[in-house]
Image: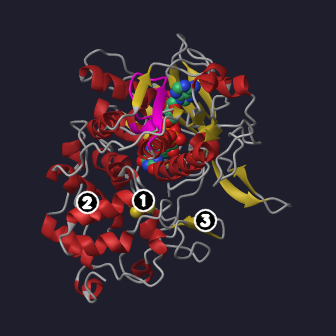
Amino acid sequence: MAKPTGFMEYKREVPEDRPPLERIKDWDEFHCHLSEEKQRIQGARCMDCGTPFCHSGMLFNGAASGCPINNLIPEWNELIYKGLWEEAIKRLHKTNNFPEFTGRVCPAPCEGACTLGINEPMITIKNNECAIIDHAYSEGWIVPEPPKVRTGKTIAVIGSGPSGLACADQLNKAGHTVTVFERSDRVGGLLMYGIPNMKLDKKLVQRRVDLMAAEGITFKTGVEIGKDLPADKLLKQFDAVVFCGGATKARDLVVEGRENKGIYFAVDFLKANTKSLLDSNLQDGNYISAKDKDVIVIGGGDTGTDCVGTSIRHGCRSVVQFEILPQPPMERQKNNPWPQWPKVYKMDYGQEEANVLYGSDPRQYCIMTKKIVGDDNGNVKEIHTVNIEWKKDDAGRFVSVEIPGTEKVWPAQLVLIAMGFVGPEDKALKQLGIEQDTRSNIKADYGKFTTNKKGVFAAGDMRRGQSLVVWAINEGRGAARECDRYLMGYTNLP
Ligand SMILES: Cc1cc2nc3c(=O)[nH]c(=O)nc-3n(C[C@H](O)[C@H](O)[C@H](O)COP(=O)(O)OP(=O)(O)OC[C@H]3O[C@@H](n4cnc5c(N)ncnc54)[C@H](O)[C@@H]3O)c2cc1C
Ligand code: SF4
């Protein structure tokens, strides 16, 4: 245990983000760090519970709880407290290939499961994780460590998001020769072209990719498997193939007026922005600008939040975020007990920024889009909505019911659809005859990650559906382990 009385002596402290009015002027990260002394005190609060739920990564009543990659949280909390940062990063890297990503973007289900959180503010786990890896990089401890022996086996990983990167990293560590194919011009999947720069600096993604390349992994960008290179040909060239292509088919808004101009999928908006930012600091104009526009974001989740933050940085006139579900409660409800992830109301960075600029949280709850109206040139002009309430039908299912008299018209010159994803693209899957499940994800059992085709594995959003970075890392690691077992007849990968 770090310090037996730590949780009684010290309060939870997280670093203040950069102030909203300052950070919206640039695209730099909004996170800051605590001083080393303060971070060590945060490590001291950990009670080193006999049964640490924080690192359990289990389902309780169908709800995820704890760290999905089973980070050894109490162990590195103690090491931080003692100032043993080098030992801490060794412990952290045992379970997490990319703590600099999760330390910034993970929603931290670990913290929702922290025992201290039952009656006190929980441990600052996510922030401690970020501090460990950032400290390690700044000390120069993170250097290429190529495997000493190569097995001679070759593996193709399709897709370079967190699942593909984690899978490639593990397989390379096991001595296999790994090639990652990515259709985009940059490596990283949604780490690069989904999550905006202010949440995860793209230099950090590139730094990790460069490290992996220096360790012997080959990255081939601008190659779409199934189009530029047929999947069956790939299978002949490599000893095994791992599909990590993500769940990239966006859910569309089926509504009158959808054909108007000025309506985009959130990911297209976010990708174009980051690409232009990296290519030319937004000087090439190759992005969808929200400047001086009334922006409506349809979808109240994290992707919608990223659209809000991006629109604000462009200088939009106004921004509203529609959410079809009710506003979450301020406190945990009885049907959402510890150690489950607490489903409570909170403002994320985009909402905080809108709140400071326009005076309120941009989210409108229980609202449904009825139709979109365009001007004479076919450009979106307004959105018509109605408020709804959720009621149980005769079968006990929740259904939405419109509330008469709540119809409203919203001005909009830019509409961003952030309603989630319906599954993976399947051109390459069809070429190999890979089976898909009822939700169109690749059919491969969790834990085994094998498809119906010998030597072909699947991981990440492409297998489990739209999820989180930390789950993608979990799946990439698992698929690597099973792929290694398939190639060698045994495996030492965790
Ligand atoms: C805007 C946005 C913000 C998000 N924010 C967060 C967050 O803050 N925290 C969090 O935990 N999660 C977040 N998520 C979810 C998270 O990013 C995903 O769950 C995660 O990236 C999935 O990883 P993956 O490796 O399975 O797929 P992806 O990251 O989607 O990567 C798949 C890659 O495969 C490539 N590809 C696909 N098909 C082919 C092919 N045939 N040939 C070659 N390449 C191909 C794609 O171009 C892509 O680069 C966010 C998602 C979005 C959309
Ligand atoms: S990866 Fe996520 S869940 Fe795991 S320790 Fe880090 S913040 Fe917590």
The amino acid at mark 3 is Ala
Q: Amino acid at mark 2?
A: Ile
Kindly tell me whether mark 3's CB lies below 8 Å from ligand 2: no
Q: Earlier in the sequence, mark 1 or mark 3?
A: 3
Which corner quadrant of the image does residue 295 belong to? Answer: top left
Find residue 341 and report its horizontal and vertical position in percent. 51, 66
Residue depicted at x 25% and y 17%: 283
Which residue is located at x 66 percent, y 70 percent? Answer: 61
State which region is magenta. 175-191
Of the two numbered discs 2 and 1 on the same chain, state the one appearing first in sequence. Answer: 1
For label 1, the SS is helix
Q: Are marks 3 and 2 in contact (CB under 8 Å)?
A: no
Residue highlighted by disc 3? 63
Residue at image x 28%, y 41%?
204
Q: Which mark is residue 95?
A: 1
Q: Is residue 454 left or right of residue 218?
A: right
- Viewer can see residue 260: yes
- The residue carrying mark 2 is 132
Relative image position of residue 148 (x, y in whole percent): 35, 44
